[in-house]
Structures are given as structure tokens and as C-alpha cells.
């Protein structure tokens, strides 16, 4: 088990480093001026030169990428006159006359747009996306499993055909189209009855300037975001259950007069859970990574909207922070999924 965890963490760390390396090369090579984006067109030459020296922007591309990895490293040997030290949240392990060894939090530098640390902006946006993703995937799991089990038990019936038709239509609708449809139908046409806003975030400021939790702003994004996962989970559940239902032990259980509910609980779920779990985990990771179109349409301030904003402004530190967060989320979800395989299916074991 320990070696399995270390192996997965090593693979995940390698993926993160590779993604950072590729993105660093692309973004640092881009024909933009980070100094002008940070200070505007009227900044003086002394400020420009100081900023370039601080982040080694006057050096070659390889040196810039190397020092960016230094910023992300939790352990760093740094010169005492390094200008980046004032931005690090650090503790000195060893302090010499000219250089020191420090342990610090990974530093993604400051946003070009507002001068705030990029990681702080990311931490502020992520909880809203987390709530949205969990709410959407929970509804998708409940509806998808129910529809899939009904379709598999009543295969080739009218219910089976209706469920398959619903799955085909819902999966073929892109998220930005489903978002617009949900907005028009529930917030515009039926807005007087539903009382749901067209746009809004999980946390909003009221007239007194207090930050309040607005759960009603979560309803429409959850509906728009959960449509496609429902269709995929339902179809995967149906296919997996049909494969199990053709087994001999299922026919034996039915010959003994087992009820459909008992059949699902005792035989279908334990034997068809792995492909369903894979579908759920992949969709959940995608939702956690930021539902870009949904958050953009609803102006829902989460990871997806933050990523779109950083791309529009070409805010390199914020883009890097968002991408690294997305990779980390996928690694964590995949690791948890591997453990869930062994929990639901006793045939799967991890060995040291």
C-alpha cells in the first residue's frame, strides 16, 4: 500500500512538473511585456528595471524558467540580497553571510492585473467552484444511477427508450448552450415564479456591504452543469448492469424470486461499480477544474471564471496558478478513485 501511494504521488508530481515546464516555456516566450502589464504605460525606467531584476525578466528564457521553479520550490537556497525574499512566506533554516537556506510556501508571484498574490486569488475562488462541483456531481450521481438501473432492469421497454433518448439529447447539448437555455427558461420566462437570478455568485455583498451566502445563485448553475454528467452516468450504469444481468448468478437469484430492489443492492451495485466509478471520478475532476462556460454565463465567481479572466488579461502568474491547481485536482481525484476501487470491489488489492 505504501509503495502504491508513493508511486501514484511520484507520477502525479511528475505530471505537475511537466505541465509547469511546458506552460512556462509557452507563457514566458510569448511576445508580451509583463512590466507594462503590471505598471501600465507610464511607469518610470527605474521601476521597470527593478521589476525585471526581481523576477530575472532581463535574463534568457531558460534562466527565467529556472527561477520560476525556484519560486515554486518549498526548499530554496537563496542569496540574502534577492529581491524576491520580501514576497516569500518563509522560515530560515540556515542563514549565512551571503546566502541562506529557507523553507517557504510555493510562490506563484503576483497578479499583473491587481498586484495581489496569484495563489490568494485562487484560494478565494476555489471554494465556490468546490461547492458547485460537489452539488452538481451529487445530483448527477443520484439521477444517473436511478435512470441507469431503471433502464437496465426494464431493458427494451418504453422506459428504457425514453431514458436513452434523454441521455442522447442531454449529452449532445454543450454546456454553454444548456446554461443559456436554463437562464432563459427558469430565470427569464419563469423568473416571477422561481425568483431565481440570471447571474450571481455563491457569496454576494448586500446593500450594507456585508458578504452573504446566496444559495439561490447556486441552483441554475448546478442544473446547467449536471445535465451532461447525468447522461453519461446513466448510460454507463445501464451498460454495466446489462453486462452483469446476463451472468449466471443473476439468473439464479431471479429464479429464487429476488425483488428488483434487492437485486440492485446485493448483486448489481457491487459487480458493476468500477466503470461507473471511473465515469463519476472523471466528471468530478472536470467539474472541480472549473466549469468555464457555466461560470462565465452565470457570472459565478469561481475557478473557471478566474481562469477565463486571467487568459483575457494574459495574467501569466494567475494563469500558471490556475493550471497548476487543475493538475493537482486531477491527481488527487485519480488517487482517491484508485482507493475507492478496492473499497467497493474486494477483488482489487494493492500490494507493497
Image (spheres, rainbow, N blue to C red):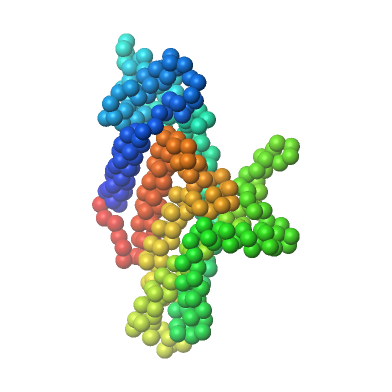
Can residue 105 be seen in the rendering of this structure? no
Can residue 178 be seen in the rendering of this structure? yes
Q: In the current view of this chain or complex, which residue is farthest to the top?
A: 97
Q: Position of residue 99 (x, y in %)?
A: 31, 15
Q: Position of residue 94 (x, y in %)?
A: 33, 18
273 or 39, which is in the foreground? 39
Going 51% across and 73% down the picture, which residue do you hit? 166
Q: Is residue 198 above or below residue 95?
A: below
Q: In the current view of this chain or complex, which residue is farthest to the front?
A: 41
Going 49% across and 50% down the picture, which residue do you hit? 292
Q: Where is residue 67 in the image (x, y as percent from the top left)?
A: 32, 27
Classify residue 78 by image quadrant.
top left
33 or 338, which is in the foreground? 33
Q: In the current view of this chain or complex, which residue is farthest to the bottom?
A: 255
Q: Is residue 217 above or below residue 111?
A: below
Q: Is residue 293 above or below residue 312?
A: below
Going 40% across and 28% down the picture, which residue do you hit? 33
Q: How many marks?
A: 0
Horizontally, residue 203 falls left or right of residue 147, namely right
Horizontally, residue 100 falls left or right of residue 207, namely left
Going 34% across and 65% down the picture, which residue do you hit? 346
Q: Position of residue 126 (x, y in %)?
A: 51, 44
162 or 174, which is in the foreground? 174
246 or 110, which is in the foreground? 110
Amino acid at each position: 500500500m505504501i509503495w502504491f501511494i508513493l508511486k501514484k504521488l511520484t507520477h502525479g508530481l511528475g505530471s505537475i512538473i511537466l505541465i509547469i515546464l511546458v506552460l512556462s516555456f509557452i507563457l514566458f516566450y510569448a511576445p508580451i511585456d509583463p512590466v507594462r502589464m503590471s505598471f501600465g504605460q507610464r511607469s518610470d525606467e527605474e521601476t521597470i528595471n527593478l521589476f525585471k531584476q526581481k523576477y530575472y525578466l532581463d535574463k534568457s528564457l531558460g534562466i527565467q524558467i529556472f527561477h520560476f521553479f525556484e519560486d515554486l520550490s518549498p526548499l530554496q537556497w537563496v542569496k540574502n540580497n534577492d529581491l524576491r525574499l520580501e514576497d516569500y512566506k518563509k522560515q530560515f533554516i540556515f542563514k549565512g553571510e551571503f546566502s541562506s537556506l529557507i523553507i517557504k510556501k510555493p510562490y506563484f508571484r503576483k497578479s499583473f492585473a491587481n498586484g495581489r498574490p496569484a495563489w490568494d486569488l485562487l484560494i478565494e475562488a476555489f471554494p465556490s467552484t468546490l461547492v458547485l462541483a460537489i452539488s452538481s456531481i451529487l445530483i448527477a450521481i443520484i439521477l444517473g444511477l436511478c435512470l441507469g438501473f431503471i433502464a437496465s432492469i426494464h431493458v427494451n421497454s418504453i422506459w428504457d427508450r425514453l431514458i436513452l433518448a434523454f441521455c442522447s439529447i442531454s449529452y449532445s447539448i454543450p454546456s454553454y448552450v444548456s446554461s443559456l437555455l436554463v437562464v432563459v427558461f427558469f430565470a427569464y420566462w419563469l423568473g416571477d415564479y422561481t425568483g431565481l437570478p440570471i447571474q450571481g455568485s455563491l457569496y454576494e455583498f448586500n446593500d450594507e456591504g456585508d458578504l452573504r451566502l446566496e444559495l439561490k445563485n447556486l441552483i441554475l448553475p448546478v442544473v446547467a452543469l449536471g445535465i451532461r454528467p447525468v447522461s453519461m452516468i446513466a448510460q454507463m450504469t445501464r451498460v454495466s448492469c446489462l453486462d452483469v444481468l446476463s451472468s449466471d448468478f443473476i439468473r439464479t437469484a431471479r429464479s429464487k424470486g429476488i425483488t428488483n430492489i434487492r437485486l440492485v443492492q446485493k448483486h448489481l451495485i457491487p459487480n458493476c461499480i468500477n466503470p461507473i466509478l471511473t465515469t463519476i471520478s472523471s466528471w468530478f475532476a472536470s467539474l472541480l477544474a472549473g466549469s468555464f462556460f457555466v461560470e462565465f454565463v452565470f457570472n459565478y465567481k469561481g475557478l473557471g471564471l478566474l481562469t477565463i479572466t486571467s487568459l483575457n488579461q494574459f495574467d501569466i502568474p494567475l494563469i500558471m496558478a490556475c493550471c497548476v491547481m487543475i493538475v493537482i485536482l486531477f491527481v488527487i481525484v485519480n488517487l482517491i478513485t484508485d482507493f475507492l476501487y478496492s473499497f467497493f470491489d474486494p477483488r482489487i488489492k494493492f500490494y507493497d
